[in-house]
Image: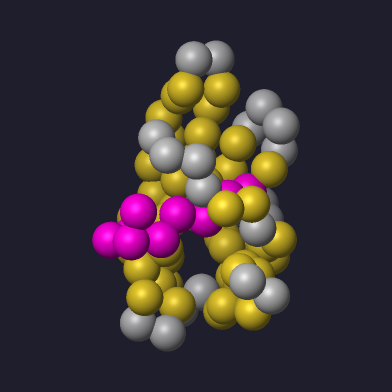
Amino acid sequence: MMAGTPVRIGVLFEPNKRAKPVWFELNRQKHVVNETTYHWKDREGETLLLHYAVTSDGALYELVYNCTDQSWSVHMRGIE
């Protein structure tokens, strides 16, 4: 997987539910998540990655949470 851009992100954690990304900052601009269209898990070696395909203002982004270093990154779909 290509490295994404590190981002600051707002996430809701509710009991008995998956984490829900609600906004992220990219290039000093806040993007509100309109919809999470898909989510999945995979691994890079021992590192568990949580992926969220989200839309914001008509664009599709992939937000990725690295469970090992507890960081978020964004991958712009169709641009990489």
The image shows residue 74, relative to residue 48, as above or below, that is: below
Specify the quadrant of the image occupied by residue 58: bottom left
In percent of width and height, residue 77 lies at: 33, 59
Q: Position of residue 78 (x, y in %)?
A: 28, 61
Indicate yes or no whether the magenta region holds residue 2: no
Q: Residue 74 in magenta?
A: yes
Q: How is the image coloured?
A: secondary structure
Position of residue 20 in the picture relative to residue 43 (left or right): right
Is any part of residue 4 visible from this angle? yes
Q: Quadrant of the C terminus?
A: bottom left
Quadrant of the frame with the N terminus: top left
**Figure check: 75 above or below 60:** above
At x 45% / y 54%, what residue is drawn?
A: 75
How many numbered dots are placed on residues in this image?
0
In x, y percent, where is residue 21?
57, 62
Nearest to the observer: residue 36 or residue 64: 64
Q: Nearer the viewer, residue 38 or 28?
A: 28
In percent of the image, x 51 and y 34: which residue is there?
49
The magenta segment: 72-80
Asked if residue 33 lies left or right of residue 71, the reply is left
Residue 79 is left or right of residue 46, and the answer is left
Location of residue 76 by image quarter: bottom left
Q: Is residue 16 visible?
A: no
What residue is at 63 percent from the left and 71 percent from the top?
Answer: 27
Looking at the image, residue 56 sits to the left or right of residue 19; the answer is left
Farthest-out residue, bottom: 57
Whether residue 11 is situated above or below residue 50 in the rendered picture? below
What's the residue at 56%, 79% (across, down)? 32
Spot occupied by residue 14 in the image (x, y as percentages of width and height): 66, 57
- Residue furthest top in the image: 46
Extreme-left residue of the structure: 78
